Amino acid sequence: MTAAAELFALQETDLALDKALARLAEIEELSGETEEIITARHWLQVADERLKQLASTQKDLDFEAEEVRTHAAAVEGKLYGGGVTNPKELQDLDADLKSLKAHLQTKEDALLEHMEMTDQFEAYRAEIAIRLERLEAEWRDAQGHMAAEKERLMPEAVRLQSLRETEAAAVDRAVLSLYNLLRERLRGVAVAGVERGMCQGCRITLPTNVIQRARQSGAIVQCVSCERILAF
């Protein structure tokens, strides 16, 4: 096997190893909860706190309305109970009752408006809860798939690393140094095949003497354009 062919085989191993390691890193990065889940849980907590506040306020409004209602019932009892006969007192009681009923109506309107607001927040909270439940279910499902993928990829990465070390050990150190340098510069692809007289790395047509030298001598020959090592 020529040095270029050895490098081409090493590159295939390196590319496969790069892919496996990149995916393992991605799986590790995705192991935490998504931003969507964190945001949905935050707004669910906000909705719960708001509902607690609304429940407390509704309790106060109920108490206030009940106080006015009790007071109005007492005044109405005096007005129509027959115990008061003085026209002036009856007139005052009637005025008080009208005022209390108007006040009670205001309280009941406020209570009704508050209950409607509570209903809206409960509906909003339910929507968030459903969304969070769906997101968490999707996340758990994805985590299960990624865990299985990680279990498969880890031994594969170990195998590829071992193969890479074996293949690299068979390559001349100076040639290996050039290969590593080119891999770093050229996004992992240091070796390019030649098809129909063209470098498959940069797609230019190679000079005939370059092709002949690379094909016949078995020496390391680089593309005159992209500098990748040429392999047949």
Image: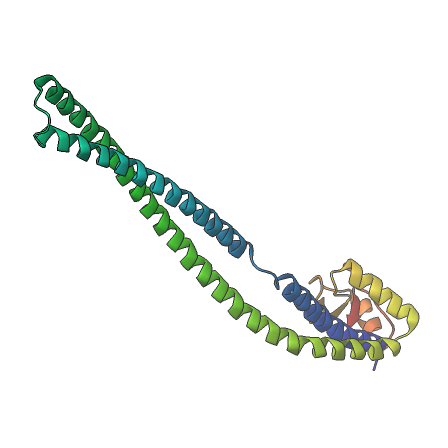
The residue drawn where x is 77% and y is 74% is: 8
Q: Position of residue 4 (x, y in %)?
A: 82, 74
Query: Residue 198: horizontal and vertical position, in percent?
Result: 71, 67
Question: Which is more toward the observer, 111 or 205?
Answer: 111
Q: Nearer the viewer, residue 152 or 89?
A: 89
What residue is drawn where x is 42% and y is 43%? Answer: 53
Quarter location, residue 18: bottom right
Residue drawn at point x = 78 percent, y = 66 percent? 190
Q: Is residue 83 visible?
A: yes
Numbered-mark total: 0
Report whether 213 appears left or right of 145.
right
Seen from this angle, which residue lies furthest bottom?
1
Colour approach in the figure = rainbow
* 38 sits to left or right of 189: left
Vertical order, 158 against 51 (above or below): below
Left or right of residue 82, residue 224 in this image: right
Report which quarter residue 17 is drawn in.
Answer: bottom right
**43 vs 180: above or below:** above
Q: Quadrant of the C terminus?
A: bottom right
The vertical placement of 170 against 32, above or below, is below
Residue depicted at x 50% and y 54% = 41
Res 94 quadrant in image: top left
Question: Position of 169 compared to 189: left or right?
Answer: right
Residue 194 visible in image: no
- Residue found at the far top of this picture: 88
Residue situated furthest front in the rendering: 83
Q: Position of residue 32 (x, y in %)?
A: 61, 61
Q: Which image quadrant: the N terminus? A: bottom right
**In front of the other: 55 or 23:** 55
